[in-house]
Amino acid sequence: MQFSVVIPAYKAAHQLRRAIDGCLMQELQPFEIIVVDDASPELPAETVRDQYPAECASGKLKIVSLPINGGPSVARNIGWEVSSGDFVAFLDADDCWDRDRLTIVAGWLHDDPQIDWLAHRYRLPGEVKPKTIQIPSKVTLNRLLVGNVAQTSCVVVRRSIPMRFNPAMRHCEDYDLWLRIAASGYELRVSETPLTELGRPQLTAGGLSGNRWAMRRGEMRAYYHLSQMRPMMASALPILISFSLMKHLRKSFLSARPQRTISSDH
């Protein structure tokens, strides 16, 4: 079983080495690592070639340089198109995998050959989570409609799946794709085992997910795209949009509440 790793890179020269090293130190080596330089101003393509001359010369590490910045969807799609492994494993430049990540994922895929899309959980920076290997469970479309169950750096997808990330989306583009894959009848699974460490917490400043309202609008767009794909879902669209708005209002309310402090005076 061969894995093609796709790493989109934009303004990530100082983070990229950690991600690549994490791939090269895998117990089960990836078939190829594809870094897509999304027109970064600090020239990460040249940096990568200088840091990994042997891997680049052998073809183990490939660099695709885009002439203009297209965003994460475009970069991932191009990496997907030039890949040649059985499965595509996505990895953001500021994230890193556990050393046994591909070994464990390959075992799950071997035990259940019907799987087309597989995900697992993650850890936040400095967070310690028990690493009990849990068998992946089935992910239905209804389960996905409640919310995204996977961060992109925790997903592998069968390369032959024809759907791609929506290039017009820069927020929730992963969730949009997962919904369309599930709606097309492919087999999705997710494990509660954390095998990826994120470079930063989700929904924090410094990443696209830091814009909460943009992320929520992306979620609503994903619901709309699903209703276009499956007309029978159109009647449920107002409910899904209302559900998304309610989640946004709830999170905004909770984040705006003043934090209680405990006084030392009694």
Image: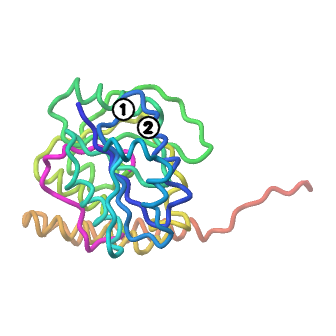
Residue furthest to the left in view is 231
Seen in the picture, residue 84 relative to 244 is either above or below; the reply is: above
Nearest the camera: 41 or 182?
Answer: 41
Residue at which label 2 appears = 24
Within the image, what quadrant is residue 102 found in? top left
For this rendering, which residue is in front, 189 or 197?
197
Name the residue tied to disc 1: 29
Q: In the rendered structure, which segment of residues is drawn in magenta?
A: 153-170
Left or right position of 77 against 90:
left
Residue 124 position, x and y percent, is 55, 47
Left or right of 72: which side holds 210? Answer: right
Does 155 lie within the magenta span?
yes
Q: Residue at x 36, y 45 (%)?
A: 57
**Where is residue 258 shown, x and y percent of the image?**
68, 68
How far apart are the two marked residues, 1 and 2, measured between alpha carbons?
7 Å
The amino acid type found where label 2 is placed reads Leu
Q: Earlier in the sequence, mark 1 or mark 2?
A: 2
Above or below, 94 against 222 in this view is: above
Q: Residue at x 46, y 46 (%)?
A: 52
- If the image is split into quadrants, where does the N terminus sit? top left
Q: How is the image coloured?
A: rainbow
- Residue 116: quarter of image: top left
Give the camera-side residue of 67 and 1.
67
Q: Magenta stretch: residue 69 in it? A: no
